[in-house]
Image (spheres, rainbow, N blue to C red):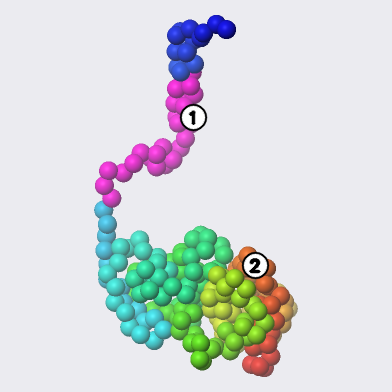
Amino acid sequence: MQEPRASDIGRRDVMRTAGACAAAAGLPPAATAQIQPSESEEVRMASVSFQVNGQAHSLELDTRTTLLDALRDHLHLTGSKKGCDHGQCGACTLIVDGRRINSCLSLAVMHEGSSITTIEGLGQPDSLHPLQAAFVQHDGYQCGYCTPGQICSGVAVFEEVRAGIPSHVTPDLMAPAALTAAELRERMSGNICRCGAYSNILEAMLEVAGRQG
């Protein structure tokens, strides 16, 4: 078998290098900039104060810190989970100033003076929130990873309906929304359960909704 000549190897290397250069040249400027490692990156710190589960907290944070990371890493409230980290799964759902948010998409410094409720603030083992108790009864938690976000979102859903806020499936925008299965499914559609416990979660919410009238 004839050994490859040095000139042949040289040509292949040249073609390979030329192809890589051509591909890099076709990238947009923003993409090529990301390829180059940054020699130094300035860290900006800021103070933020808010109430979490009724307790006042003041933190000195990197301004890029999300609310979820501030709660988990700085206040050690690890009940809220980091799932997709893209605001798509709902595992990080919190109640902030009465409204539910995806805390992985919200910077902590945006919430100066806010009132924040996490799963730890809804109930304790010896005094569960009604929705927490219903999740236990109907096995709505299964693996449990998405459960804190599901419950925080569910509590906010009940408040939304009481406030008269309609959803895409509300049949009459001029009448109070009802806590029907269709309404609950629509309003909870931003919370994903990889275990597929949706029917159990719905049963738990319908039970609480029935008690609330």
What's drawn in magenta, residue-wise? 15-41
Mark 2 secondary-structure assignment: loop
Q: Picture coordinates of residue 64 (x, y %)?
A: 35, 61
Residue 30 falls left or right of residue 38: right
Please state, as top left, top right, bottom left or bottom right, where the C terminus lies in the image.
Answer: bottom right
Residue at 45% of width from left, 22% of height from top?
17
Res 162 visible: yes
Which quadrant: the N terminus?
Answer: top right
Towards the viewer: 137 or 28:
137
Q: Position of residue 154 (x, y in %)?
A: 59, 79
Extreme-front residue of the structure: 1
Disc 1 packing (10 Å; few <14; some 14–19; many ≥20): few
193 in relation to 127, above or below? above
The image shows residue 12, relative to residue 77, as above or below, that is above
Figure check: 64 above or below 55: above
Quarter-of-image position of residue 183: bottom right
Can residue 22 be found in the magenta stretch?
A: yes
Q: Which residue is mark 2?
A: 195
Mark 2–mark 1 Cα distance, whole angstroms, equals 42 Å
Q: Nearer the viewer, residue 90 or 22?
A: 90
Residue type beneath disc 1: Ala
Residue 184 is at least partly visible in this image: no
The overriding secondary structure of the stretch rendered in magenta is helix
Residue occupied by mark 1: 23
- How many numbered discs, if any? 2
Closer to the chain start, of discs 2 and 1, is 1
Q: Position of residue 56 (x, y in %)?
A: 33, 83
Q: Amino acid at mark 2?
A: Cys
Q: Residues within 10 Å of mark 2 (few under 14, many from 20)?
A: few
Q: Residue at x 51, y 92 (%)?
A: 127
Residue 118: x and y in percent read 46, 79
Residue in front for this viewpoint, 130 or 163: 130
